[in-house]
Image (cartoon, grey):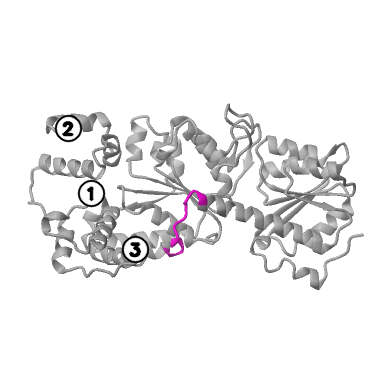
Amino acid sequence: MTDGPSATDASVATSDPWLAKAQILVVDDEPGMRNFLVRTLAPRCARVEAVGDTSAAGRLIEASSFDLIILDNILGGRTGLSWLADLRRDGLFTEVILITAFADLETAIEAVRAGAADFVLKPFRTKQILNAVVRCLDRSALRRENFVLRRQLAPPDRSQAAERIVGTSAQMVRTRDLVARAAATRSTVLVTGESGTAKEVTARALHELSAFADRPFVPVNCGAIAADIIESELFGHVKGAFTSAASSREGLFFYAQGGTLFLDEIAELPLALQAKLLRVIEDRKVRPVGSDREIPIDVRLIAATNADLAERVAGGQFRADLYYRLDVVRIHLPPLRERVEDIEPLARMFMDQLSAQLGLPPLPIPLSVLQRFEAYPWPGNARELRNRIERALILGTFGEPDSGPTAEPRTDDLAEVEKRHILRVLAASEGNRAEAARRLGVSRKTLDRKCAEWNV
């Protein structure tokens, strides 16, 4: 016999942070049970929907996302278990609590095999169902957090992201203002700038300053994932979708649910996948590889590139329609050589951070070193400056003038300036011409021709 919520039962879940934000779907053909569950959950959750059959439930699932489904096993013409098995085959990985008045060991085993997260026997008390709901939501949140940690997607100081947009230049003042404005929306943001200009730091700041900062931030390097598996990585796949798909798997969009997905090096996304990403942005749904079902998502998208996307569009390497959908709010990060006044605060920030991380006493940065830093063009931008500070900390000295960044003779010869810049980037890429060409935004063929001209 079910009962209404009591003051004691209410204390079960009021302190759980995930329950207050949860969106829950109840599927039960008994009006009394639906009403009881709605009365119990609605005051404690962000949203509760209740329907009497799987057809209505299917329409709701196709229209919006849910964090949890409470599913009755006996539903008129079919069982909840068979419907759950269909959902899992279609790539829907939402947590499910199965409730039933007729339970035995075989049913419990079938529930686990079908993918149910918990099993509650009718009749149950308010405290029982609330505990089951909280367990499922906490387990889901923990699974996502563990996934992120395993992939090392979140640095230990990510909560400090907003403060790491360092600089006193007019460009960085404008950047911080634009980040603050864009963070207040769910609009798609395109972050542009050369390699090493802190595009991921900017993306994290957008997330940390938003109203959903406690939700996941999942960065993805599109250039680091093989073209034949990136669709599965992003959207997930169902069992048997391809030869090695021995089981179903959630995609990165799933792990970013409610939060932010950061697509770095978006220009490296294969053309075929660009079309699918465009559809995701327009429809707010993803289709796991091998599935016939589209799953609603609630994800804020931030993309970044060091390439000229307009040029890529003109060359047929990037879809124009996707470019315009990504370029809703653009944040351009200028190279370090164009904001010399930011070099000193960045150097001092890196010195403080790295000395603490390495357990080494910070080094004073003499005026002579700062002058050399300010005269150097920093082809690797802030990342190169950080590496320079780290090396100095480890060695205990900034070295002689010829052992680090130094001022080079100024020249008005454009060809000489181009040669020096290309050779610096090639050196920073450790001789990897493909990587250097990517950083420079030119083709490998162009870089090979230049090197041949200079007998490099």
Residue projecting furthest to the bottom: 7
Q: Residues within 10 Å of mark 3 (few under 14, many from 20)?
A: few
**Residue 159 is a magenta residue:** yes
Residue type of the residue flagged with mark 2: Lys
Q: Is residue 381 above or below residue 39?
A: above
- Judged from the image, the secondary structure of the residue bearing numbered disc 1 is loop
Q: Is residue 351 left or right of residue 67?
A: left
Q: Tell me where the magenta segment starts and ends, as one range.
A: 150-160
Disc number placed over residue 379 in the picture, else none = 1
Q: Can residue 413 be seen here? A: yes
Residue type of the residue flagged with mark 1: Pro
Q: Residues within 10 Å of mark 2 (few under 14, many from 20)?
A: some
The residue drawn where x is 12% and y is 59% is 400
Label 2 or label 3, whichever comes before in sequence order: 3
- Residue at mark 2 to residue at mark 3: CA–CA distance: 40 Å
Look at discs 1 and 3 and give the one toward the viewer.
3
Observer-nearest residue: 155 or 284? 155
Disc number placed over residue 450 in the picture, else none = 2
Observer-nearest residue: 378 or 412? 378
Say which residue label 3 marks. Answer: 358
Q: Is residue 202 above or below residue 431?
A: below
Q: Is residue 11 above or below residue 59?
A: below
Look at discs 2 and 3 and give the one toward the viewer.
3
- Residue at mark 2 to residue at mark 1: CA–CA distance: 18 Å
Residue 21 percent location from the top left of the image: 65, 60
Residue 201, by quadrant, is: bottom left
